[in-house]
Every structure is written in structure tokens, then in C-alpha cells.
Image (spheres, rainbow, N blue to C red):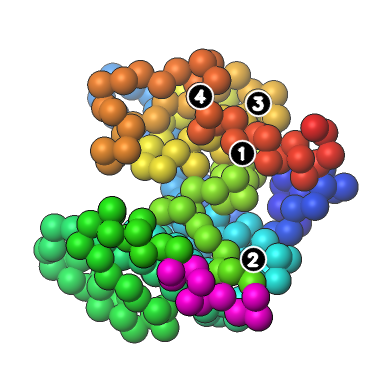
Amino acid sequence: MSLLGGRFPAADLPHFRLGTGPTPVQRLELPDRDDVWVKDESGFGDGGWGGNKVRELEWIIPEAHRRGRSTLFTVGGIGTHWGLAAALYGREHGLRTVLGLVDQPVDDHVRDQLRRLGESGAVLHRYRTVGRLKLAAPWLLARYSTRGRLPYYLPAGGSSPVGSLAYVDTALEIAAQVEAGVMPEPATIVTAVGSGGTAAGLLLGLRLAGLSTRVLGVVVNELVPARRRHDQRSGQPDCEAPARAWRRRAGQS
């Protein structure tokens, strides 16, 4: 059982394990600093996979089954790691994956990733721009409907309210490591911000655990203006969405 499910057993939160936790934490050896720690997510998944995408799929795949969906539909660049994880883990658990892919600058890594996507069993549809993919999305949803049920749509990176529960659970895992004396309570957790789901889930989970740790997001794409400061205390919608979804499931709204 997940830590979140154990804390709120009455909540309808389908989940199953795809990786092994808790992931380790260790102090970094830095000149003149002894208070920087790293939580290593790289080995979380099975078969060489790791990181937040596998954690998200632990919640997304059982939710798709709960909704009676047989197909996942998600989007990303032609070098998407998220799309490949969804395709491989989805296939293992009886789900077809349809990917809407947008062209991006190509290097050797992107070429290798596109080859892996082609071998993953996913159905690939490739578009030159995000705008063209958006225009095609309704047609793709209709085309891959099964017995009158649309595919289960997931935004880029799996950053949905359900997917964000993964890092609510991870924040509870961090709190348990603090309580066990494995690490001190962090003053700040630094995470990359692409679609925002990891940061939002961490923030909600830290507050549920009673920790006052700040979440500092480092923008790694163009979705959030890099010069604009998004303060966790200002009630940004991307932080509120997973909180609302969790409260609905737990019967607290």
C-alpha cells in the first residue's frame, strides 16, 4: 500500500507498485557546505527505469483501469521519455498507448529515443507543431475510442491531478525518512519544473506531513516565463489542482 493510502485508507486511491522505495538520500560532499542532500530517484523503476514518470504511472495505470479505459493517449516531443515510459508500462498492464508527437531539434539521443518509441508498441502520430497536434487531438481521441469509451487522456509529462499524487506520496516518504533520522528536515526542496506536477505534489504532501519545507522549482522549458516568480504561498492554480482532486477522493470537500 502507498503511504498516502495508508494515511487515508477510506479514500478511493487505486495504486500499485512499479518501483522500489524508499529511494535513498545522501549528503553531498561540497566545499564549505555540509547541509545539501540529494534524494536519488534514478533507480526507482524496474528494468533500468527511474524517476518521477514511473512514480506517476503507479497511480495513472490503475486509475485508467478503474475508469474502464483500454487506451492511454498522451503527448510530447519526438524524444519524450514520458511517452516511452507510458507505452512500456502501459503495455505490461494491458493498455494500448497512443502518442501525439511534436517535432523537436534532433540529435543522436532524440534519434535513439524515437527508435525506442517505434519499438515500444505504441501507436505514433507525428506533427510539425504543437498547434497541429492540438487540431488533431479530437480526431485522435475519437479514432481510438473503444466500445464508446474515449482513451484516457494525459497531458505532457503525465502531469494530471492523479499523476501528481505520486509526489504527494513521495513527500510522505521524505517525511518518514526525516522521522527515522535518515536525514534532517529540509529547509528547501529543489526540483525541476516542466509541467509542474512534481512540484505541486511535493508541496501538498509536505503540508499533509506537517513539514514547513519550501518547494523551489527550476523552470526547464518555456511553459512558465523564466523571469516570473511563482511563489508557493500565492495560491497558484497548478498547486491547487492536485489538492482539490485529493480532497474530492478523500471525501473532504
Q: Of residues 213 and 145, which is closer to you in this image?
A: 145
Front position among marks 3 and 4: 4
SS for callout 1: helix
Pointer 3: what residue? 207
Which region of the structure is painted magenta? Answer: 139-148
Q: Which residue is mark 2?
A: 64
Q: Residue at x 23, y 57 (%)?
A: 129
Name the residue type under label 1: Pro
Amino acid at the residue labelled 2: Ala
Nearer to us in this view, 153 or 138: 138
Task: Say whether marks 3 and 4 touch (CB < 8 Å).
Answer: no
Q: Is residue 79 visible?
A: no
Secondary structure beneath label 2: helix
Quarter of the picture containing the N terminus is: bottom right
Is residue 73 in sight in this rendering?
Answer: yes
Q: Secondary structure at mark 4?
A: loop
27 relative position to 201: left or right: left
